[in-house]
Image: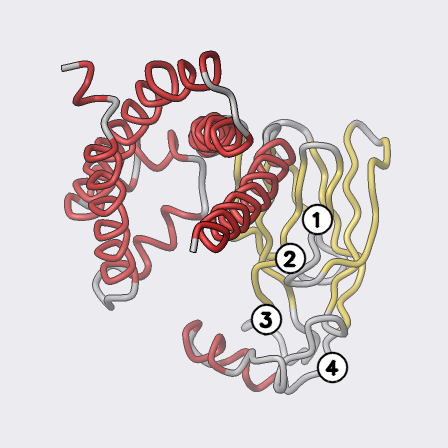
Amino acid sequence: MMRFLSSMRLAFWSLIALLLWLLVGVIIANSPSYYEATKAMNLQVLSTWLTNEALHQPVLLSWFLVLCAMCLVLGVSFLFCTSRTLLKKVQTAPSLKTTLLFTLHLLCMGIMLLHLFSMSTGFKYSNIQLEPGQSWTSPEGYHILLRSVQYTDDVSVLNMPFRQQRQHQSPNEFHYRKNTARMSLSKNGVLLAESNIGMLTPLVYRSLRITLSSFYLPQNTNSQVPGVSLVFGKNSVIWPFFVCYGLGVFLIAFYTLISWKSEADNL
C-alpha cells in the first residue's frame, strides 16, 4: 500500500485526472446555466460560499467536492513520494536533479496548502458599488471612500450585459491605465492608504486589498460619470503564495534545462 501511494503511477494519473476535471469545470463555468453561480463562487471566501449559495447549486457543489477529493489524493501521493522516495535518495545519493525534484515536491505541497488557506480564511466582500463621493464600511470597521473616477473610453459600453462588456475590453478598446478610481481606506478615522486603482492595479495595504472589478453607469441619474464595483478582502498568505508559485515555476524551468542538457550530453 505504501509503495502504491508513493508510486509515480498514482501521481501521474492523479494529475491527469485533475487536469481533465478542471477542464470540466471550465466548461461548467462558461455555460449559460452556471456562469453567474460560478462567478458568485469566485467572489467570496470558500466557507461563506459553502454555507450559502453552494447548498442551492448541487452540480457546482458536486464538481467542487470531487475536485477536493482529487487534490487530496494528489497531495497524499506527493507526501508519500517526497517522504519515502525522494528524501531517501537525497540522503543516500544526493545530486542536483534529486535535490531539485525534492524541493519541487515540497513547494507543490506548500502551494496547495497556501491556496486552500487563502480560499478559506480572512474575508471577502464583493459587488460593492460606489459612485464618486460615496463610501462603504465593512463589518470589521474598514471605511472605503471613492473620491473620484476617471473614465476615458466610450461609456455606452457600460450599458451592455457583463459578458458583452468583457468582449469590448481588449487592450485596443479599453485603456486599463487611463480608466481609474481614486480610493481611500481608513479605520477608526485613521487613513491607512489612498491611491488610484485600475482593473489590473488594486490598492494593497498589508494583507488588505481593494480590487476594481468593473465600471457601471448609475441607473437613477443622467450622469455620465461611471461608478465602480469593488471587491474588498483580506488574505494574509497571498504574498507567500506568489513567492512559492514563482519559485516553483523557476525551479521547474531549471530542472527541465538541466535534464535536457543531461540527455543531450548522453547522445
Q: Position of residue 192 (x, y in %)?
A: 83, 36
Kindly state the secondary structure of the residue where label 4 is placed: loop
Which residue occupies 72% across, 72% down? 179
Kindly state the secondary structure of the residue where label 1 is placed: strand
Question: Left or right: 39 with respect to 66?
Answer: right
Q: CA distance from mark 4 to mark 3?
A: 17 Å
Mark 1 and mark 2 in contact (Cβ < 8 Å)? yes
Give the farthest residue toward the front: 267
Q: Position of residue 114 (x, y in %)?
A: 50, 29
Residue matched to label 3? 218
Residue matched to label 4? 152
Between tags 1 and 4, which lies in front?
4
Q: Quadrant of the N terminus?
A: top left
Q: For the residue marked with disc 2, what is the amino acid?
A: Leu
Q: CA distance from mark 1 to mark 4?
A: 23 Å
Mark 4 and mark 1 in contact (Cβ < 8 Å)? no
Kindly state the secondary structure of the residue where label 2 is placed: strand
Question: Left or right: 206 with respect to 16?
Answer: right
Mark 4 or mark 3, earlier in chain: 4
Question: Left or right: 29 with respect to 175?
Answer: left
Vertical comparison of 215 with 59: above or below: below
Q: For the residue marked with disc 1, what is the amino acid?
A: Ser
Mark 4 and mark 2 in contact (Cβ < 8 Å)? no
Q: CA distance from mark 2 to mark 1?
A: 7 Å
Mark 1 or mark 3, earlier in chain: 1
Q: For the residue marked with disc 3, what is the amino acid?
A: Pro
Which residue occupies 34% across, 19% down? 85
Vertical comparison of 87 with 109: above or below: above
Between tags 2 and 4, which lies in front?
4
| Local crowd size for mark 4, using a 10 Å CA cut-off: few (<14), some (14–19), many (≥20) | few
Residue matched to label 1? 135
Residue matched to label 2? 130
